Image (spheres, rainbow, N blue to C red):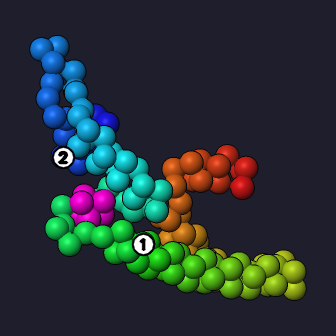
Amino acid sequence: MHYYDEIGLLVPSRRTKADHRLYGDREIIRLQQILSLRQLGLSLSEIQNCLASPEFSLPQAIDLHLARLKEQMAVSRSLFTKLSKLARQLQASQSVAVEDLIATMETITMTQQYLTQEQHDLYQNGKV
């Protein structure tokens, strides 16, 4: 919540003399909106834009999330195809073309941008 305050996403209604943040009903409702939009996969900047827009609507947020999922699926399909090709090459000749390996590594890098920090940590620790 400190970070949300720092970026202006959730500003406390007031502060104590000791500079503790105090939140009212309006801020609690906004926090719930922020958390719900995070669950939909929106970034903090996207959430900030949504909540700042007078035309904001939940269907709009869902459409934004659907567009992101469609993009993720396309990148995942591309990675699947490239990894399958590498697997076939390795089974056939125990080697792969450098160009194919580079293209696959680039796709893996693109895929990682869609992972949450928790998913990324699991992947890095070999638990996925």
Segment colored magenta: 46-51
Q: Residue type at mark 1: give it.
A: Ile
- Residue drawn at (68%, 85%) of the image: 81
How far across and how far down the image is residue 110, in percent? 50, 71
Q: Which residue is mark 2?
A: 8
How far across and how far down the image is residue 12, in percent? 19, 35
Q: Secondary structure at mark 2?
A: loop
In the image, is residue 53 above or below residue 86?
above
Q: Residue 50 magenta-drawn?
A: yes
- Residue drawn at (63%, 82%) of the image: 77
Q: Residue furthest right?
A: 92
Q: Secondary structure at mark 1?
A: helix
Q: Residues within 10 Å of mark 2 (few under 14, many from 20)?
A: few
Q: Quadrant of the N terminus?
A: top left
Q: Residue type at mark 2: give it.
A: Gly
Q: Quadrant of residue 111?
A: bottom right
Q: Is residue 51 among what the camera can see?
A: yes
Q: Please name which of the two marks, 1 or 2, marks the residue nearer to the observer.
A: 1
Q: Which residue is mark 1?
A: 62
Q: Residue furthest front?
A: 25
Q: Quadrant of residue 59?
A: bottom left
Q: Is residue 95 left or right of residue 5?
A: right
